[in-house]
Image (cartoon, rainbow, N blue to C red):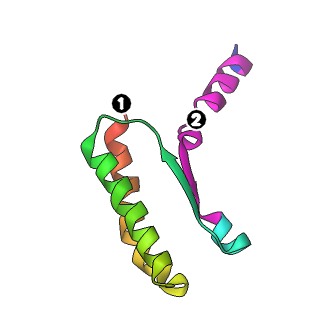
Amino acid sequence: GNEEDSQRNERYNETRYHGLNLHSYWFRGTVEFRYMRGTLVGEVAENWILFTHALMEAAKRGLAKEASKILSPYFERWRESLRLLEP
């Protein structure tokens, strides 16, 4: 029934398959990225790599205050590329 469908949809909700915690930056002063969902779409994987690389470079340079401005275009490119995975 509807309850079973709801539980199934929660279990397979796409947000569960991205290991990126930006909220932690404002709470703990850290950013966590662990994994990206599996994909065979090169553009999606490439944009994730570019985003995480930019994130590490910003951290190495101590650019916490400017990180949002630096990372935003990479994050948006990755988010947009996820639309390629939609049926």
**Residue 68 seen in the current view:** no
**Figure quadrant of residue 85:** top left
Q: Say which residue label 2 marks.
A: 13
Q: Residues within 10 Å of mark 1 (few under 14, many from 20)?
A: few
Q: Earlier in the sequence, mark 2 or mark 1?
A: 2
The front one of 82 and 57 is 57
The stretch of residues the image draws in magenta is 3-23
Per the image, the residue denoted by label 1 is 87
Compared across the picture, whether 46 is left or right of 72 comes to left
- The answer to whether 72 is drawn above or below residue 64 in the figure is above
Q: Main secondary structure of the magenta part?
A: helix
Percent from the top left, x then y, of residue 41?
A: 28, 39
Name the residue type under label 1: Pro
SS class of the residue under badge 1?
A: loop
Give the quadrant of the N terminus: top right
Three-letter amino acid code at disc 2? Asn
Residue 41 inside the magenta-drawn segment = no
Q: Is residue 25 above or below residue 11?
A: below
Q: Position of residue 19 (x, y in %)?
A: 56, 49
Q: Is residue 2 left or right of residue 84?
A: right
> Few, some or many C-alpha atoms within 10 Å of disc 2 (few <14, some 14-19, many ≥20)?
few
